[in-house]
Amino acid sequence: MRRLSLLLSLLTLCLATAPALADDPDFLDLQLGAFDVRHAHSFLGDLEYRSDYKLWVFKPMAGFFATARGATYLYSGFAVDLFFGDRWVVTPSEAIGAYDHGNDAHLGAVPEFRSSLAVAYRFDDRSRLGVMFHHISNAGIGVHNPGSETALMTYSYPFNKIRALFGN
């Protein structure tokens, strides 16, 4: 029920702010931080691609993270960019993916859902620097559902600039 309430709130916010949405390029996003902060588990590195293609206001995304203790998570979902002026961007997202705990937190199932919120400053070249928080949970489909919270620093770099580096 909480997920449904969150989704409805997100949709309402999207409808209310749709005219304020600005076009941005697709991004390659590097995220570094702490995985499962409630239990001080480990360091996490995440690489995420966020498309500039829109399905209404939703942008597809996909990513992969690994922790220092061997946990991995391959995921895909949707994100929404909400702009506050020219510089500040709030990006809520939802994803589903496959989690393997390695020697890290046992989250109770292979399929896990990720709800996240990022707040970033947007530079003139449209790259972004910010913070992200996300919660990963199996939504009760596993035998147990401890969930995990993650706190990250994030840097989003326009993908077209990466392609230009390689002459494409």
Image (tube, rainbow, N blue to C red):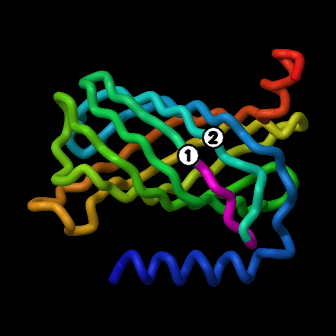
Q: Residue at x 90, y 37 (%)?
A: 124
Would you say the residues marked 1 and 2 are in contact, meaning their CB atoms lie under 8 Å apart? yes
Q: In this view, which residue lies farthest toward the left?
A: 143
* Of callouts 1 and 2, the N-terminal one: 2
Taking depth in this image into account, of 137 and 85 the one nearest to the observer is 137
Q: Is residue 70 above or below residue 2?
A: above
Q: Identify the image quadrant of residue 37.
A: top left
Q: Amino acid at mark 2?
A: Tyr
Q: Residues within 10 Å of mark 2 (few under 14, many from 20)?
A: many
Count of marks placed on residues = 2
Q: Position of residue 87 (x, y in %)?
A: 82, 49
Mark 1, residue position = 62
User: Is residue 60 part of the magenta span, yes or no?
Assistant: yes
Q: Residues within 10 Å of mark 1 (few under 14, many from 20)?
A: some
Q: In this view, which residue lies farthest toward the front?
A: 168
Q: Secondary structure at mark 1?
A: strand
Mark 2, residue position = 49
Q: Is residue 116 above or below residue 10?
A: above
Q: Identify the image quadrant of residue 136.
A: bottom left
Q: Position of residue 146 (x, y in %)?
A: 18, 56
Quadrant into which the N terminus falls: bottom left
Q: Amino acid at mark 1?
A: Ala
Q: Residue at x 46, y 36 (%)?
A: 64
Q: Residue at x 52, y 46 (%)?
A: 132
Range shown magenta: 56-61
User: Is residue 80 part of the magenta span, yes or no?
Assistant: no
Q: Identify the image quadrant of residue 163.
A: top right
Q: Position of residue 4 (x, y in %)?
A: 42, 81
